[in-house]
Image (tube, rainbow, N blue to C red):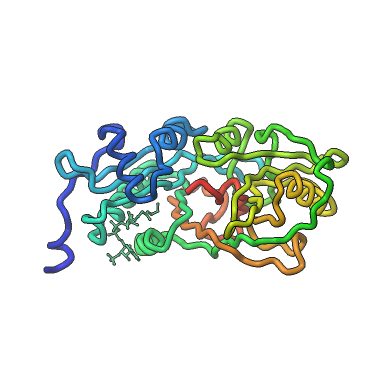
Amino acid sequence: MSKAADRPSYDVVLVEDVPRQQIVELLQAAFGPAKTADHYTWKHVEGPWGPSRGWVAVDGDAVLGARLIVPWRLALDGRSFAASRAMDGAVTPAARGRGVFSGLVRREMSHLAAAERWHVLYSTSVPASREAYRRLGWTILEPRPSVLSVRLPRRPALVEEIDPRTVQPTIPAGRLHTDWDARGLGWRVDPRSGHRYEAVQLRNGGSRLLYRRTTLRGVPVLVVVVRTGPPEEQSALLGAACARGRCGAVILQALDPATSARPRVVSGSTVSVWQQEGPDAPVDARAGGNWTFTGADLEGVL
Ligand SMILES: CC(C)(COP(=O)(O)OP(=O)(O)OC[C@H]1O[C@@H](n2cnc3c(N)ncnc32)[C@H](O)[C@@H]1OP(=O)(O)O)[C@@H](O)C(=O)NCCC(=O)NCCS
């Protein structure tokens, strides 16, 4: 049978037209039990930039697939722009490989194109969705590596606990980045995300660190989400935070030679980008060099 003839018949409806429990069950089946109803509410109902849009493929009462779109905000040199992040997309195993996911993404692209203004839609994507995005004309940016860096412990008393919402990333000029503010960061570190975040500040410096603890092959490590402050304070900051969290190593977004003599890449995030062109475009979002991503953008949010 040809692929077209094999295509399942379905209607596309908005996510609010489907019982929420059905969407939660679809996401749980695809990603595991961590995708609870509470997690869904946190991510898709109470997001800092409004509730998610969602396109759902239905066959009668049955849900075949869904593509959720989280309203996001990007900033560039002090200007702020509405954007969108595709997070949580899944198709039931029986309906996979027949264009359902691509059809739902295409629906969102048409929705954004209708506004006829510059808009960036992006996603941190896994291999299967990445290939679908590539075929839809998206740009796949160079992977952003996470590196493991062993830390020498420092005195835990060098740091004090602070409010995670105060750890705003510092972004170089000319780079597109998430427009995090205290409200956005408060949402980002909500325990319903499935992670417990902490933040500390160097007592005699002011450099700040937002992180969570995890284990890598049974060994406790600290995952850096955002860090601020001058390079000469980073060693004390990370060492003291590690000692405080009883971790011997940190995982950092992006290769940064300053953090370790011999960093080891442990994973990578691949960001796929589509931009709706418009006369008001301030930058080309399809060029990876025009972006700065921090852990707040990449770790633990897919
Ligand atoms: C990823 C997923 C949503 C794809 O749904 P789908 O409806 O099967 O996707 P499509 O049929 O639209 O596939 C479009 C293209 O993606 C690629 N693709 C799909 N599944 C793939 C896989 N398992 N491996 C590699 N490429 C794949 C193919 O290139 C395909 O094009 P083709 O059919 O012309 O070969 C589905 O496999 C899924 O639910 N996976 C589990 C959850 C997940 O990983 N979600 C993505 C992260 S948000």
Q: Position of residue 258 (x, y in %)?
A: 77, 61
Q: Quadrant of residue 274?
A: bottom left
Q: Quadrant of the N terminus?
A: bottom left
Describe residue 138's horizontal placement relative to residue 227 as left or right. Answer: left
Q: Quadrant of residue 159?
A: top right
Q: Position of residue 279 (x, y in %)?
A: 49, 48
- Tell me if residue 264 comes above or below residue 104 in the rendering: below
* Residue at left offset 45%, top offset 49%: 121
Describe residue 124's horizontal placement relative to residue 62 as left or right. Answer: right
- Tell me if residue 233 comes above or below residue 23 in the rendering: below
Q: Position of residue 290 (x, y in %)?
A: 60, 56
- Residue furthest toward the right? 204
Q: Is residue 116 visible?
A: yes
- Tell me if residue 159 comes above or below residue 265 in the rendering: above
* Residue at left offset 37%, top offset 47%: 113
* Residue at left offset 74%, top offset 39%: 200
Give the quarter the ligand 1 occupies: bottom left
Q: Position of residue 9 (x, y in %)?
A: 15, 51
- Tell me if residue 238 comes above or below residue 23 in the rendering: below
Describe residue 244's horizontal placement relative to residue 285 as left or right. Answer: right
